[in-house]
Amino acid sequence: MTDTEITADLVRALLEEQHPDLAGLPVRAVAGGWGNQMWRLGDELSVRMQRMDPTPALQLKERRWLPVLAPLLPLPVPTPVRSGAPSERFPKHWTVMTWVPGEPLDHGSIRRGGHAADTLAEFLRALHVAAPADAPVATDRGAHPRDCTGGFENFLQAVAPDDAAEVRAVWDDAVAAPAWEGPPVWVHGDLHPANVVVSDGTLSGVVDFGDLFAGDPAWDLAAAWVLLPAGTASRFFDRYARADEAAIRRARGLAALKSLFLMLMGQNGDRGLPGGKRHWGPVGRAALDRVLRG
């Protein structure tokens, strides 16, 4: 992490130093962000500042691959337009990117559930294509659920929901499901309510591709429960039309894992712990309820 306080004045000074043609645009803070801090730059751009991430790897990954993927995707995604290099003023990386308009789902809602299910399915159909040989591989995610049991147990014990036995049954079914046997496909890897935006009651954009990898699409298919309103998962899978029974079982277990994580971040927020987000608790509980309803 950096000891440098990131302020609007610092962002403006960095722009004056490295991209002076952009320095006159208004700079406004954007709520949220942990590994990277976001600043709005004018109406159409943003500045992504490396903050808690120990290395610039996630930003550099976005710089490399988002320009390749963005033209293929049916929803707006942030696309790098300028690169900021470490300097004496700020010793970390930063990137000027396109701004994806809308409200983060963890602060908004989906009213048009059917439309959102179709939109998410079409987005993932476009994203989940065979990735090239030099695509990034997963580090802390992307594995079969059987290889993530330690993390699941830690989350389950920390959250301790009343329906823990039901949650464990969903997880055990995912662990028992056959593995992905297709070619590695592009996977966003971190689809949760803070990483998608909504407008007019439906999904309108996807952000934060720092965890992008090539692998099992089930990690994204979990979004059928984590993001979409109750009763729309079946419509999503019908529209997506590429998930077999094993993929759906893995995805449902991973949705339980992600829901527990959201609930844990909510608890951490209630306790005032670093990185905690109080409003994620109810979001995670609602997602877990959808998982358990199947």
Image (tube, rainbow, N blue to C red):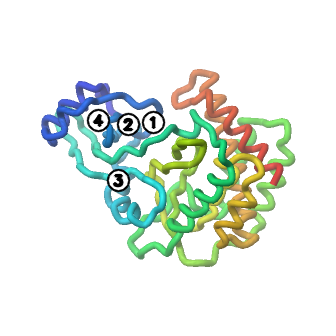
Residue on which the image places disc 4: 42
Residue 262, visible in the rendered structure? yes
Sequence-wise first label, 3 or 1: 1
Q: Does residue 223 appear to the left or right of 3 in the view shown?
A: right
Q: Residues within 10 Å of mark 2 (few under 14, many from 20)?
A: many
Residue pictured at 59% horizontal, 35% vertical: 108
Which structural element holds mark 3?
A: loop
Residue 29 at what x, y percent from top left?
A: 37, 28
Given residues 288 and 40, the one toward you in this image is 40
Marks 1 and 4: which is nearer the front?
4
Distance from label 3 to label 1 (Cα)?
17 Å
Which structural element holds mark 4?
A: loop
Residue 63 at what x, y percent from top left?
A: 32, 56
Residue on which the image places disc 2: 38
Which structural element holds mark 1?
A: loop
Marking on residue 163 = none
Q: Residues within 10 Å of mark 1 (few under 14, many from 20)?
A: some
Residue on which the image places disc 3: 79
Distance from label 2 to label 4 (Cα)?
13 Å
Marks 2 and 4: which is nearer the front?
4
Marks 3 and 2: which is nearer the front?
3
Residue pictured at 53% horizontal, 73% vertical: 184
Q: Residues within 10 Å of mark 4 (few under 14, many from 20)?
A: some
- Cβ–Cβ below 8 Å for labels 2 and 1? yes
Sequence-wise first label, 2 or 1: 1
Q: Amino acid at mark 4?
A: Gly
Residue on which the image places disc 1: 33
Residue 23 at what x, y percent from top left?
A: 18, 34
